[in-house]
Amino acid sequence: MAAESDPDVQATLCSDLLNFSARDTALKWLQATDLPKDVYLHLARYVPKIFCRSPNPNPKNEDMLTQHILTGPMEWYLCGEDPATSFPKLEQANRPSQLCGRVFKVGEPTYSCRDCAADPTCVLCMECFLGSVHKEHRYRMTTSGGGGFCDCGDMEAWKKGPYCQKHEPNSSDPSVEDPLAHLSEDMIARAYNIFSIMVKYAVDMLTWEKEDELPTGLEPPERQDSYYCMLFNDEVHTYEQVIYTLQKAVSCTHKEAVSFATTVDRDGRKSVRFGDFQFCEQAKTVIVRNTGRQSKPLKVQIMHSSVVAHQCFALKVLSWLGHVIGYSEGLRRVLCQVGLQEGPEGENSSLADRLMLGDSKLWKGARTVYHQLFMNSLLMDLKYKKIFALHFAKNYERMQSDFVKDDHDREFSVTDLSVQIFTVPSLARMLIIEQSLLTVIIRTFMDHLRHRDLQGRFQFERYTAQQAFKFRRVQSLIGDLKYVLISRPTEWTDKLREKFLEGFEAFLELLKCMQGMDPVTRQVGQHIEMEPEWEAAFTLQMKLTHITSMMQEWCSTDEKVLIEAYKQCLVVLMQCHSGFTDGEQPITLSMCGHSVDTIRYRVSQEKVSIHLPVSRLLAGLHVLLSKTEVAYRFPEQLPLCELSPPMLIEHPLRCLVLCAQVHAGMWRRNGFSLVNQIYYYHNVKCRVEMFDKDLLMLQAGASMMDPNHFLMIVLSRFELYEIFNTPDYGKRYSGENTNKDVIQQNSTLIEEMLHLIMMVAGERFSPGAGQVSASDEIKREIIHQLCIRSMAHSELVKALPEDENKETGMETVIEAVALFKKPGLTGRGLYELKPECAKDFNLYFYHYSRADQSKAEEAQRKRKRQNGEDTALPPPVLPPFCPLFASLGNLLQCDVFLGILSTVLQWSVAPSGCAWSESMLQRVLHLIGMALLEERQQLESSSEDNDVTFNFTHKISRPREDPSNCPSVLAMLETLQNAPHLEVHKDMIRWILKTFSSIKKIREQTATTPVSETGGQALEETVHDQDKAERKRKAEMARLRREKIMAQMSEMQRHFIDENKELFQQSLEELEASTSTALEHSPSLPDAVLVALGPGRTRGSEKRQVVTCILCQEEQDIKAHNKAMVLAAFVQRSTVMSKNRRRVMHDPDNYDPLFMHPDLSCGTHTGSCGHIMHSHCWQRYFDAVQAKEQRRQQRLRVHTSYEVENGEFLCPLCECLSNTVIPLLPPPRACSPGISEQQNLNQWLKTISQQINVLHYLKKKQNSSSSPDAEAADQMDETLLAEGFQPDLQPKNPYSSSIKEMLTTFGTATYKVGLKVHPNEQDPRVPIMCWGSCAYTIQSIERQLIDEEKPLFGSLPCRQDDCLNSLTRFGAACWTVSPLQAVQSHFIRLLAALVPDEQVENSPCILDVDMFHLLVSLVLSYSTLHCQDVSGLSLAAGELHLFHLVTMAHIVQILLTSVPGGTPMDQESGPAEEEEAVLSLYTVLQQYQGSACREACSGWHLWRCLKAGILPYLRCAALFFHHLNGVRPPAGLQVSGASQFEQLCGYLCLPTCLMQLFQSNRELVDPLLQRWCGHPEMQNYMKDNHMLQSFPRESNRLIDLPDDYSCLINQASSFMCPKSGGDKSRAPTLCLVCGTMLCSQSYCCQTELEGEDVGACTAHTFTCGAGVGIFLRVRESQVLFLAGKTKGCFYAPPYLDDYGETDQGLRRGNPLHLCHERYRKIQKLWRQHSITEEIGHAQEANQSLVGIDWQHL
Ligand SMILES: [Zn+2]
Ligand SMILES: [Zn+2]
Ligand SMILES: [Zn+2]
Ligand SMILES: [Zn+2]
Ligand SMILES: [Zn+2]
Ligand SMILES: [Zn+2]
Ligand SMILES: [Zn+2]
């Protein structure tokens, strides 16, 4: 191998380095005649010596040498003096640009003001934003995808407040000033020289394509055989493929391969091998062979090391230039000049051009660097920005073509700079005028869409994946078009008009290729075989939606442009039509005395297309003519006479008929593609430029036609003309046995057709069609959304069309129509419709889907009922049409219209008619209502002259004049009013009749001829009475129905209780409550005498405990000899109370868990849902689950929310995640008095230690039995002094076999989970783990009660109470299934921690022991000793002695650890006796400790610390003994309140003055204290206080979060992945438990855990949360719960916007603020150990969560 850190080279380099002088070199250069040559010589000599010396670069070294040898001389040359003095001078004289220009990092927060930004691409960096006026405005926050810069200071980007405080210009207008003015002539010349050479050098090197040669002048003096095997990135191969290939090709480890792959992905290339040519070539061959099988192989080049070296330096040069121009605007200007200076090849040959045009050939890293320099220089200089823009536009077409072929993402393409240029209005305008930018973009776009059909329309039929990929890239051109159009001109010049219209023409050409594309033909007989491609066409349509709207808006700002555009559009539309209509036969339709000529065309038989962008654009322009009043002011300039209304309406009408037919089910055989197209046609994303415009076109056409003619054509296109023209259609159908499908189809078509008439005559909310404003339109949309139901802000936004700035205009009007209701702890804030707006509700609102409509109808009827109103939903009063559309109103009174109404009514009246449907009738009624309102409105608004021509009331009161002898419409309505089958419509008919008579009245008042009034009045009266009676009857019926339902329900409850889980659960919980509170109902004793333990213990209740099995419903007594009953339980490791997350259990197999450290670093928590089963019922259930799971896994390999192989199951009742069961045990036997009652602690301890000695002896004997030892035999006699102790006694196990089995089951589970080991029921550590879990669970519940400020007793939910109860009793019983000797030896070791025992080694220091754990273990293991005692020692007395002993130790522990230094100022006097006692104890302790390590405190102070410190321990002990012995707690502990110290002491049989414990045991105390303080560890602790755990322990909380979410984003954006040097993390994730930021969901940070690759989060949970984790995914604004490797779910984040909504995924970008209540809720879940349970429920509710690979997060 060549040149791997060659010592000789190093040496020469060193000597070079020592002798090199940047100044001398620069001096030489200053005198040089051929500067470029000299500089190149210098580079040729040094660059290869500095870069690329070995396979592993040393960036620090390189940077240092670069600075010294390469850029150093350049800086000297540039400055002409020492740069260290020159640069600061430059900087001082510099007038910095008022542009901020900060280039965004990936993930950095950016802000845009919705009120002031020129467009949404104008953004501010966080610093500027906070210093700007916009932080008080409506702003949006997003995270940057990288690239782009802060627009602060750009006058064109902001309508208001363009500067932040920092970038505010000081005084004079800086743009006038020439930045070169600050530099000397010489310096300008030198800068020019050196910049020219270096930029050219960099450009040459970066665009250099030869692998083994260098440009002239750069050839290295000595050439070595050293090469790199350079791997380039592509977007085809996956990470896994690359990693696998690399491992093979260059035989590296997996880790190295991951690192290579990561770098390739980030920088675009990475050398994977260094060595001689041969060596590199080998690797290349393997890589190419391995990756080339399925696709294009990975790109690999064998590059000479000197080439790579120069390329590396070229990048450094660019960064250096960026750095240097930062000193001075003048230098920036020089660099811009150098960059854009025309090269030798003429136009577009400047260095900047060369980079742009070579962009797609560069690797990612190089692109990023030069793009940054562009942004830093060309885009920051006001003068050169314009010149650069021109260059950019000139190269535009080629760059775009390169980009389309390239496979890098757009953010790595130079074309992405378009957003920086085109969005500047002045630049965009200039480019439109000078470079025909609009036309260029559109033509370039069209060039890339080559597939056309015979008519020249786009064709996407054979649309391959590759084409789709290309198509997506092509779409970026539409984005550019949007940028150019985004700001509308305020002033038009003739040149601009010309160029815009030129662009408009190009745009029309584009639309022409879309008009009629993807046509469909109805499939009859067979279903289509293949779904036709439709998405591409719709994508195109969708992308162009905003462009089309913006084009129209541009037109609307200038009359001349509008007129010209209208003309152009019309011409193109006629061109489109010419191909169609030829050859279609003309026919004549006649009806109701009118006739019209049209063509024969059936949508159901011929081709029809949903794409009509040209017609729609014309419709849009037509409305603009009306809106801008151009139509009235310049009618002579408009080609209105050329318009043929039937031609205008033809295609939109076909399209609407197509929709109707699809609804009617006539196109079922055409598959989903058509259904989807229809869906999008109406969808809010498309409808503005599709459905809405088709309707407008119909309105425009109809307004220019005879309404009768229009309706006849409509009937004909709906293929309903025959039906309405055949008088006996209805009868015919009822008579014949016709195909039901056909009837159904026709009904739907008629309904749709009626709806269409409503829309054409009634939709007047587009400004220009009706006399409304834009805000009226949006208000109406909102009202109709809220008529469906109350909605959250985001839901409403989604339902409203957005403009190109993603604005809906909702905020400006919402308060006028809705009230905001704030959210609670869950859910979100809702907008509710203001009651007064309900009158504007239109049931047939044209944007309702059928589902929306029926929901809205239901909601509105309900509302009216609740208000005690009738339930008619009449049409709302409408605004008048604009003059251009005014004649549309006549649709509602024309003859054909009346003919249609009367026909449908006739069908409805006919009793056996089956041609009609209820919704048909409903629509007809609605139409009548619309017509009546129209008439009333015209009457009301007309002048006195009574010139209203609209006379609907008159027309419906007279019979039809045709031979059918049909009664008048009015008469038929009156008939229908009494029809029994039309109950629901009666209110509406009544409303119509009422309105009718009110109009009559108005007419009569104004008319000269009086008409009898009484008729109308009487009608109204009777209507009213009938109304009342009817309502009363209905109410009565409803009441009866309700009662019946209630009766049925209670019946059901009794019978089907197990089928209705929710109901059942309730009743079960009541049952539980009654069992668990049984104890508290025992005959009441005065509280003062309630004692929980010891010989004086109060008797617990002996009440029989009966429970019901949730599986078999049988009742069962809890008795020792009965069948076992069990509680579903979940055991988990926990660090919730941990004070030291760094302590990890290393070797679980040999770990000794006997003592818990006071930092509670990791415990075992047991929880339960409280549901009780027979053990055998549970076992049967679990076996079934197991069997099912095995079958399922074999079949589907799916995951479940629980892991059966780990013993997990879901509670059969509540589906709560469980992993074991706890047996329910009877309360302990009542205590019998014994001799030990008289023993004091000291005596008792003596007895115990005698017994222990016996055990020690026996053990020794056993051990040495193989080789008998004489000495041991001698000792035996001495030690065998324990009276009444029978160590050979084997106690009888009181429990039934099934209970014993369950004792083992739960014990083993706790052991397995707690230690993370394989189950082993014989392991002596099983009981230790059980006691530990009991103690830990009690401690954790005590904490929760404190944190929630709840009383110690009586406030726990039943399930926790039951769980504690059984856990404690289990703890007391678990020794019965363990080896007795083992448990005895635990007891011996436990006791030895407090009472010296020579035979026990390694007893811990009392500061290393959690006393509550010790207490529980001692008390629960004491039975093993006691059971062999026949002397009458009392178990109860033993408990009490042990408790006192541990309490004393804890007091000492507290005094040693928790007394802060210094005496507090305020002192009160407490009980003097206690203070004295504690002070003297403290003094003794200090003595024994050897030194007075703390200042002597006052007794008062000590006593206070002691009381506070010991309280949690006492509370835990009270819980423990309560559940162990079942003694009712005193009432004082069942209420929350101040210190309950006295109550606790009483209940726990302690003296209130705890010091008495020490005083009454004098002879014992001193040696104990001495021993405790003399422990060797103690000295260490006293030296280093930091490690001490003080008491009371504070509750752990989740970390504090900032109020403003963007702080978090900012914090995360500067977070670097800790593994891949200096790279930004893609998914920064914050641990809410400890505050660590992690690089989640990324290869770089995967680690191996128990033999599996896991992501950073999962790995973190194992150290931080014992497998459970709570994270905040910062970019996504999402909380992540993880448990183990397989379980996880997402949870709503605690951040809400002003509308009370979360923004998961940060899509909406509203400012987010911390909601403390919600965060507390998450914290509570954590403290309660409910995270795993929450995940289980989430996964059960949403199965898709189960499939996620949580471990990789
Ligand atoms: Zn800024
Ligand atoms: Zn600023
Ligand atoms: Zn603003
Ligand atoms: Zn059962
Ligand atoms: Zn349950
Ligand atoms: Zn953590
Ligand atoms: Zn990482």
Image: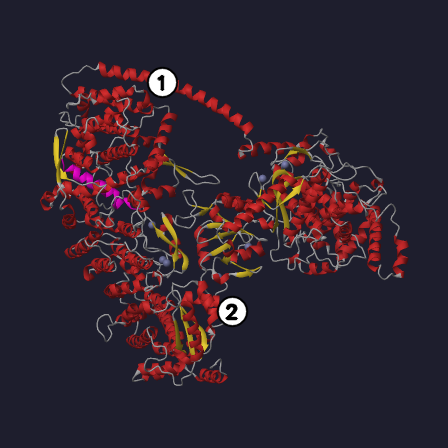
Q: Check disc 2 and report its element: helix, strand or loop.
A: loop
Please provide percent x and percent y for residue 1405. 73, 56
Q: Which residues are magenta?
A: 685-705
Is there any visible trace of residue 351 in the rendered image?
A: yes
Residue 51 screen position, x and y as percent: 43, 77
Whether residue 691 appears in magenta in the rendering, the answer is yes
Looking at the rendered image, the disc whose residue lies closer to the viewer, 1 or 2, is: 2
| Color theme of the render | secondary structure
Residue 1482 is situated, as x and y percent measured from the top left of the image, at 74, 51
Give whichever of 497, 895 is nearer the camera. 895
Quadrant position of residue 436: bottom left
**Vertical placement of residue 205 versus 862, above or below:** below
Q: Is residue 1599 left or right of residue 816?
A: right
Q: Which residue was labeled with disc 2?
A: 253
Whether the magenta-drawn stretch holds residue 991 is answered as no
Disc 1 target residue: 1030
